[in-house]
Image (cartoon, rainbow, N blue to C red):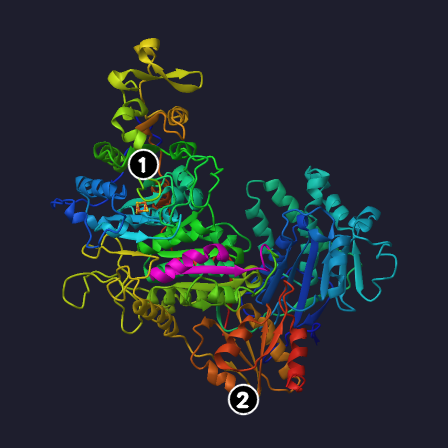
Amino acid sequence: MTVTGHGGDGPAGNGAAALPDGVQGLPARSKEAHKLDRVVIRFAGDSGDGMQLTGDRFTSEAAAFGNDLATLPNFPAEIRAPAGTLPGVSSFQLHFADYDILTPGDRPDVLVAMNPAALKANIRDLPQGGILILNTDEFTKRNLTKVGYSSNPLEDGSLGGFQVHEVAMASLTRGALEETGLSKKDAERAKNMFALGLLSWMYNRPTEGTERFLREKFRRRPEIAEANILAFRTGWNYGETTEAFGVTYEVAPAKLPPGTYRQITGNLALAYGIVAAGQRSGLDVFLGTYPITPASDVLHELSKHKNFGVTTFQAEDEIAGIGAALGASYGGALGVTTTSGPGIALKSETIGLAVMTELPLLICDIQRGGPSTGLPTKTEQADLLQAMYGRNGEAPVPVLAPSSPADCFDVALEATRIALTYRTPVLLLSDGYIANGSEPWLLPDLTALPDLRVPFASEPNAPDGSGEFWPYLRDPETLARPWAVPGTPGLEHRIGGLEKSDGRGDISYDPDNHDRMVRLRQAKIDGITVPDIEVDDPSGVADVLVLGWGSTYGPIGAACRRVRATGTPIAQAHLRHLNPMPSNLGDVLGRYRRVIVPEMNLGQLATLLRARYLVDVVSHTKVAGLPFKAEELQLVFDQVLQGAHA
Amino acid sequence: MTTVDLGLPSIGGTAGVPTTDEKQTAKSYTSDQEVRWCPGCGDYAVLAAVRSFLPELRLKRENTVFVSGIGCSSRFPYYLNTYGVHSIHGRAPAIATGLATSRPDLSVWVVTGDGDALSIGGNHLIHTLRRNVNLKILLFNNRIYGLTKGQYSPTSEQGKVTKSTPAGSLDHPFNPVSLALGAEATFVARAMDSDRKQLTEVLRAAAEHRGSALVEIYQNCPIFNDGAFDVLKDPGERERRIVPLRDGEPIRFGPDGEFGVVQDGFELRVRKVSEVGEDAVVVHDASRTDPGYAFALSRLGGQDLEHTPTGIFRSVSRPTYDDLAREQVRLAQESKPGDLAALLRGNDTWQVLG
Ligand code: SF4
């Protein structure tokens, strides 16, 4: 029997796949197993409960098993908010399936709540009939009062609509670890591994990977590793042997395109993309940056890869970070800086200098909720107009946005191609959702990665045959100026933020020259070759198009599948290049009766499209710090399809 | 002069920069750009000193880079026939840090002013100095904002009446040498635009120093702050105000060495040598590891320029950020050359069969 979980993406094509060869066997088991095509699990607990680690591990197990998956970590900005409070709740949602999925799921099918705060913060997302697993040890009067429960939900019948499993996880873990000699407190800390063990049992997950992981993670403290493994097994055995759980579930491996896969988050893919860009361009990478959520992981990752010729410089501030990166670019390295919205604000002046000096530079903005400090750990797409226009003067900058965690790798390479070919700063707009979310990644064929090598200038180039070097003499095709790095004899020249004369590059205050240079800089960016945008419309007859950009690709795609499943055609297209936009975009927009543009901002892409193409798109926006749900988008699409917005 | 070896081979400031046997002159370092400072500006003298000093280094001209910020002095790079970046206000040390770290074969100089380095760019300056990036920083101090036409600067004396402070400025000024020493700069010196000989000596020592070298240059702005340093130039005043620092020599100045610098508790003070005796006079040692001594020297004179030490306050050896950063990369590349396929694969992969 295959049961479809609640409210999923719905498979695009055929459903379940056979177990591929090579998937490791599962421990012997005694209980009945139901087959599901997809499941969404949410682990929720206190920030100190290790929910992110638990979710990560379950994700790795699902990946190792061959499911398709998508994840959504959600955690507070405070490192340790007061224990047991609502602001301190941290959760990790994971969607895994036997077909290709696009989102971490709108709602959990299973909610694991480690304390009353986690229950209270998450219960409204659990649909009626959903499975609720509660750590009863934490449901004390004190903890209940702390979050405003006047009666105990375990007793007052308020959870009647759910399949509730009450498990004393903390005391069971403590009991199992009694002989390890660990203190009560240390033993209890392993309760998240108990939860992981129990869920691993419920969903027939392989276990070797987690045990190996724990041994590796705590290799300096083997007693802690063994305690965690014991807690993990205790959770597993609890499911297997007690009467509490009658059934287990199976989600078969997904039928994905053949190849070697790994699981990857957006920030990791971005870091790897930057390393690969260095390798493919033959340039050393210089990252100048300053720590900021949610971009710091890119710094952490790149700092491990010095063996690829990657230098990471943690500067005194955002401005020095980009300044040093630009200095390195001037010297012939691939200069990179990473940040989030507030950091872009600080870097704006240096981005302007990079526009003026026409040097390559990769600027990665991992967007978060704004304005100001905003919501540091939540996602948003509200930096688009800042990326496009947030500088003094006419300072055009190419802008690109990855659509999923794995896509960050490809977009890093594409952004580098543009930066190096056209000698321009390039803005890459990722966001918290794809930066921290993960998905399976089909490893690329390295020989198929783009060749990013570009030549440095080596000879004087003055067209008048004077033997001089003209730093602003442009390539007629790309309009790029020569990249003449210090150390090249005969090409000594001076660049800077002051306006330069066309060609020669001397300081120039000439009005006509300035007008020409402003237009040349704009023309260079406008002339960047960008692939055409492709439209996905299996029916071929859709008259409504949904156009998105960046991380909304998954939810939009899932919502389109739902609409199509009801027999209604709808087309989807997604922008990777936001500046310049694909040259066929105007035609594409003109082909549809209505164009819907969902964004996690107040309609920034919609504004650009209206201004540029005079198309009155339907803007649908949400700025809640969380990604769209497929369900809510489906509603909006249905309304437009039915003419409500027409 | 003794230096403290902290693990790196003791190499000069320009080690790694290719040299040439070609004959170079001040003219070879002169670009075709017309110099556009106001007539009589102290910047001319500094430019002339730098142009005639650079050939001494025998470096390939194309391997020298001048990076500047914003301000009158920041036009400097345009007038030198080397590579140059005239960047944005206050950020030259940051840009130069990236350049110097990624290119050990370059001799990188920063040209900045009191507003550029100490106001808007103060943060970058102190962090560059503490990291000890191999940069030579020439800080032109004219104690005024010239380019924006005459507002007080972070080195203007308190109470200064300017366009923006008609009732007198309220800010207590920075002493750039004290500030640099507070950031534990490894090389700190002061020179005057009008003293070509001393300026050249200081530039030479700065170039030889491996690490950040901060050279404060008192520079006259005849337009907005004329005569700011006249007391240090006036033949009648000069001798009893300027305290020349020469390594290994007792710090004496004034007519016939009348005055000497002596230790008094934690401080240094100026006394008549005849009163304290020659043995009490401090012998200058720029190589002292602790910056406290050099700091005490920098406090001898206040904003009134009563006593003004010039020369090299401090010159100690400490590994540079850029050498260390490159060393980390080199070691990593040597011990485990990058394997992109292995990196992307990681430890947890699975196969999907067709
Ligand atoms: S304003 Fe002063 S500092 Fe600036 S160029 Fe003129 S004289 Fe020199």
The residue lying toward the viewer, choosing from A307 and A278, is: A278
Q: Tell me the residue that label 1 is attached to.
A: B227
Q: Residues within 10 Å of mark 1 (few under 14, many from 20)?
A: some
Point out residue B321 in the picture as x, y percentages from the top left corner: 37, 41
On the rendered structure, is B50 left or right of A399?
A: left
Q: Quadrant of residue A159?
A: bottom right
Point out residue A605 in the picture as x, y percentages from the top left corner: 53, 73
Query: For the N terminus of chain A, which image quadrant?
Result: bottom right
User: Residue shown at 43%/56% (left/top)?
Assistant: A349
The residue lying toward the viewer, choosing from A405 and A431, is: A431
Query: For the C terminus of chain A, which image quadrant?
Result: bottom right
Q: Tell me the residue that label 2 is attached to.
A: A540
Tag 2 secondary structure: loop
| Residue A262 falls within the magenta-colored stretch | no
Q: Residue furthest bottom?
A: A541
- Residues drawn in magenta: A344-373
**Is residue B268 visible in this depiction of the protein?**
yes
On the rendered structure, is A329 left or right of A88?
A: left
The residue lying toward the viewer, choosing from A603 and B237, is: B237
